[in-house]
Amino acid sequence: MNAITTDVLVIGAGPSGCVAASYLHQRGFEVRVVEKSRFPRFVIGESLLPRCMDHFEEAGFMEALRNCGFEIKRGARFIKGAKVCEFDFSKKHTKGWDWTWQVPRADFDQVLANELQRKGIDILFEHEVTDVDFDDNGNSTTRVRDNEGHSLTITAQYIVDSSGYGRVLPRMLGLDKPSSLPEHASVFTHVEDKRRPEGREGTLITFDVIDTKTWLWVIPFSNGMTSIGYVGPVEFITSFPGTPGEKLSAMLKLSDYYYERFKDIDFCFEPVIIKNYSKSVKQLYGKGYVLTGNSAEFLDPVFSSGVTFATESALLAAKLISRQLDGEVVDWESEYSEYIRAGVDVFATYVKEWYTGNLQALFFHHRENKEVKKQICAVLAGYVWDKTNPFVTKHNRLIRTVAQYIKQEK
Ligand code: FAD
């Protein structure tokens, strides 16, 4: 069995793992990345938020990403019947990026991984972590198996678990905790968007609300493909008969706005169904390891927060590891866990209030309050740590209060 020693082992080469690895490498640490798949590989999570641009910039990816011609995302549109609510990221309460991208993740993640390799970081593709042991000081020995069954051990001072839905350490250490969100499912695919309208309409990311709990996403890419997907209660998705493709075709008939554009369209691949994807953990860190990205927490696709949390948590974790390996004392509870959980809590409220209908009442109200809209827009752009934003600090109460006010007005 071969053996390697490194300062930091990163599990997973998605956005979370790449951001953590790149930052640590910039700080002069030796980093190894192990990735179960061969890239490019498909993964869902295609609508980014402006906040993650801060992370890609700090981790040194912006130049490579800017050269790729990904579709620019300047906001998000929500439609419910004849009602439309559009958010423009240049009109938001919090200063910061006012655009981002909408991306086929296979291509996007490949750019990040290529960039890591160009910087000299070793990625072991088609290597799966099978087992991890920690000693009393937090030093770890990780067993990894390649696709031909060969084994390798990697000893590291620190592990960043960015294994996404693989959830390597949460499973091995028994850290999984049920999510507080309702159980949902999604069915999605890509299509060659032959009837895509010219101009802005053809580029807009849209959430078409079918009913309070069910919605369709439409995410056009710059390569002519468009991602379409339904999200709803598990019973909604399973109630349609047939294959995933037959289910999605039947569901598309429910969208007044998009049916003509997508009727009889060929799917680029058999639609994928994912159920019960909301995940949580009992703790986000331990001696010698930290969980980042989806390995730590995933809420719901509705506000596209997944990649942004993946990169926010990765960058912060990398900064704290860097300080710790330099000999500083790090308070992981307050500096990592409390900070990350504060942001997750804000988004969790928005997700819950979306499905109660309160947030939808606010979005689709006929009279628009510009200040409120700017504050909510900042949250939807991923700036969920801005204490000057009342829709961040009072997220628990404010949406409900405003929704109640709207309902009384009717
Ligand atoms: P990933 O991108 O999943 O990367 C993890 C990597 O770890 C993978 O490449 C995997 O192969 C590797 N790995 C796993 N196990 C092992 C192992 N044992 N050993 C080695 N490597 C391993 N987010 C958004 O931001 N916008 C969206 O529009 C959006 N839409 C979504 C729609 C749905 C239906 C769902 C379910 C999620 C959506 N998300 C969205 C969330 C998004 O998919 C994730 O938040 C994001 O991909 C997390 O990035 P990551 O780097 O943590 O994990």
Image: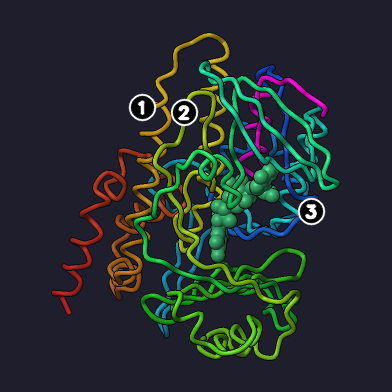
Q: Is mark 3 within 8 Å of ligand 1?
A: no
Residue 132 location, x and y as percent? 61, 33
Q: Is residue 44 above or below residue 77?
A: above
Query: Which residue is identified by label 2?
Result: 286
Mark 2 near mark 3, Cβ–Cβ under 8 Å? no
Question: In the picture provided, is 84 more to the left or to the right than 133?
Answer: left
Residue 364 location, x and y as percent? 34, 73
Report the magenta residues as a range: 1-25
Report the amino acid beneath label 1.
Answer: Ser
Badge 2 crowding class, 10 Å Cα cut-off, few under 14, some 14 to 19, many 20 or more, is few
* Distance from the alpha carbon under mark 2 to that under mark 3: 32 Å
Q: Is residue 310 above or below residue 10?
A: below
Query: Which residue is identified by label 3?
Result: 40
Query: Which residue is identified by label 1?
Result: 334
Q: Is residue 263 above or below residue 54?
A: below
Whether residue 13 appears in this view of the structure is no
Q: Nearer the viewer, residue 27 or 258?
A: 27
- Select label 2 or label 3 by which is in front: 2
Report the amino acid beneath label 3.
Answer: Pro
Report the amino acid beneath label 2.
Answer: Gly
Q: Nearer the viewer, residue 265 or 51?
A: 265
Q: Nearer the viewer, residue 215 or 272?
A: 272
Q: Quadrant of the N terminus?
A: top right
